[in-house]
Image: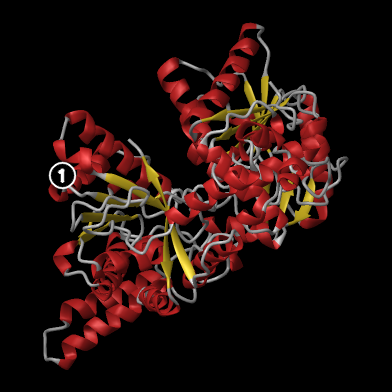
Amino acid sequence: MIDSFEKIPVRISSTPKEGVRLAALEIANLIREKQALNQLCVLGLATGSTPIGLYAELVRLHKEEGLSFKNVVTFNLDEYYTIDRDAFQSYWSFMHRHLFNYIDILPENINIPNGEIERDVIKQYCLQYDERIEQAGGIDLQVLGIGLNGHIGFNEPGSSLFSSTRLVTLQNSTRIANARDFQSISHVPRMAITMGIHTIMKAKKVLLLAWGNKASIIAKSVEGPVTEQVPASLLQQHPDCTFIIDAMASVELTRFKSPWLAGGCEWTNQMIKRAVVNISLKLNKPILSLTTKDYNENGLSDLIVEKGDAYEINLQVYYMLRDSITGWPGGKPNVVLPTHPERSSPYPKRCLIFSPHPDDDIISMGGTFMRLVEQGHQVQVAYQTSGNIAVTDEFVTRFMDFAVGFEHLFDIDSNKSQTILTEAKEYLSSKRLHQVDSPEIRAIKGLIRRCEAKATARYAGLADEQVHFLNLPFYETGTIEKKPMGEKDIDITIQLLRKIQPHQVYCAGDLADPHGTHRVCLDIVFESIKRIKAAGDEWIKDCWVWLYKGAWQEWDIDEIQMAIPMSPDQVVKKRFGIFIHQSQKDAVPFQGSDTREFWQRAEMRNACTADLYAQLGMTKYAAMEAFVRWHF
């Protein structure tokens, strides 16, 4: 069913895994229908992080349920230009690495644009690519992802509805987003060959998949006007297009963001808070200054009818926001505060902070971290992964030079360390782009990050025995692409939780991390806690879980259940804690689409949260860190 604001059918799954199954089932059913008719099934395929799970599910269907791909012909959307076919980042490599190597598709039925084609024959080559699609009978089902700027394939904003397969120049925002697959943006190709929008629109059916931090562009694409400035919005004109998205990618749709505009809204306290915060920010008026006229003119007349008085509604939401602000993240001892976000007892609490990478703790909740320590709680931090891929090669030789020099300085036999340094220099000097580091290099990079994390924890007031390095196995691939959550990851996490038996757990709910590590780390914590609860451990009944967000985004103001204010001095103290992570400063290998350093992102995000609270009529603080409680 299409929501009244949505001009394209949108199917929302609770998780990307569920969405992947929906899409894979549709593709599998089409393949089997074509097989029954003894016909070819022509699929248009996409690349990028979004369809990886889809291809894994199709591989599973092939291996476990006998789905054959012998009647399948594929045409990929795009390819970088220029790029060697065998390069790790090429889409030819991507497709074989994730799909083609594991199914029974005939090699001659695989079509991927050639990123090595000579420049003077590209126009003819692109014409022939479209002709091959037509000769195959046209695309039966086209799989798409979507860029943050709305691009589909590599059709950037401004691409014509009538464009065919062609060579295009990539926008800088696209290159920055795709830098996750390269050592730096300077290595990302500036051009690509892509199917045109006209080519895509000729597909008989289109499935567009989107997970995570795509909510804003999804809303623009399905609810906004049809415009070439948002290429995905052109799919509103396709006769059979469906968006399959997860819950996180759906939050900006009107039926979720402003359901009172779509009708049939149930006025829970949380919904009232969302609605009032929404119009307060929209009108740039403090909550206590909103009038009945404001409510009526902004789609909230039903709320006035139900509650009867704008002033009482204003007070209700004002108190909800006020009561979320506290300087006592572990609860204020010996005081009964029924509306406080946290319990007063027990005091002190055992607090366990899970940090996906060795710096997420200080970046995301450094002020809260240090305040918990200062207020006498028994704080421990668990670094879930080594973070070794995010260390530049230069840091390896820098620290090895120090190790050798240290031994020379104190007349310690440095033969072994000198040998390791020499071998490391030789290895790195001949290292190819995106080549997986040797185990020794990875170990050194992991040690660098471990030392930085320990130093930061000491800076925050912890002893070494309060710091845990889990080195979860899912992360240790040596590449950007990680393995799924495994039993060993869960076992390690359960053991630590049972050892500490925390009253508070803090973990990263920031699923906008561009490489998915935060998502996997969160799933591991969730699964571990669920298993402990199912096993009947008594201590888990007294454990509360608080989710923070990281360098990539912040909670919406109406979602925040605990906001920890920070003074200007505390902001600076947190900044200096982030600076300890020197390997992540200045030139970060995998920075995502944001070119600011992590400390700058954190300060801007924390200041923005404080500004929003002030705009709504609360006390003005220098900065705030925000949390949402997870109930299990």
Please say if 469 is above or below 159. Answer: below
- Residue 265 visible in image: yes
Residue 246 on image: x %, y %: 54, 35
What residue do we see at 16% from left, 41% from top?
A: 539
Q: Quadrant of the N terminus?
A: top right
Q: Using residue 491 as the reference point, say whether residue 90 is left or right of it.
A: right
Q: Is residue 252 above or below residue 556?
A: above
The residue carrying pointer 1 sits among few (fewer than 14), some (14 to 19) or many (20 or more) residues within 10 Å by Cα, namely some
Residue 88 visible here: no
In terms of secondary structure, where does tag 1 sit? Answer: helix
Quadrant where the C terminus sits is top left
Residue bearing mark 1: 498
In the figure, residue 468 lies in which quadrant? Answer: bottom left
- At 67% across and 17% down in the image, what residue appears? 40
Q: Residue at x 51, y 51 (%)?
A: 512
Residue placed most toward the observer, 324 or 58: 324
Q: Between 576 and 313, which is closer to the camera in this rendering?
A: 313
Q: Is 173 placed left or right of 349 in the picture?
A: right
In percent of width and height, residue 74 lies at 65, 30
Q: Quadrant of residue 264?
A: top right
Number of marks in the image? 1
- The answer to which image quadrant residue 232 occupies is top right
Residue at (47%, 72%) from the top-left corner? 599
Please name whichever residue, 90 or 287, is drawn nearer the observer in this view of the structure.
287
Say what amino acid the circle numbered 1 marks: Arg
The percent coordinates of residue 102 (x first, y second) are 46, 30
Color scheme of the displayed model = secondary structure
Question: Residue furthest toward the right?
Answer: 162
On screen, residue 147 above or below 415: above
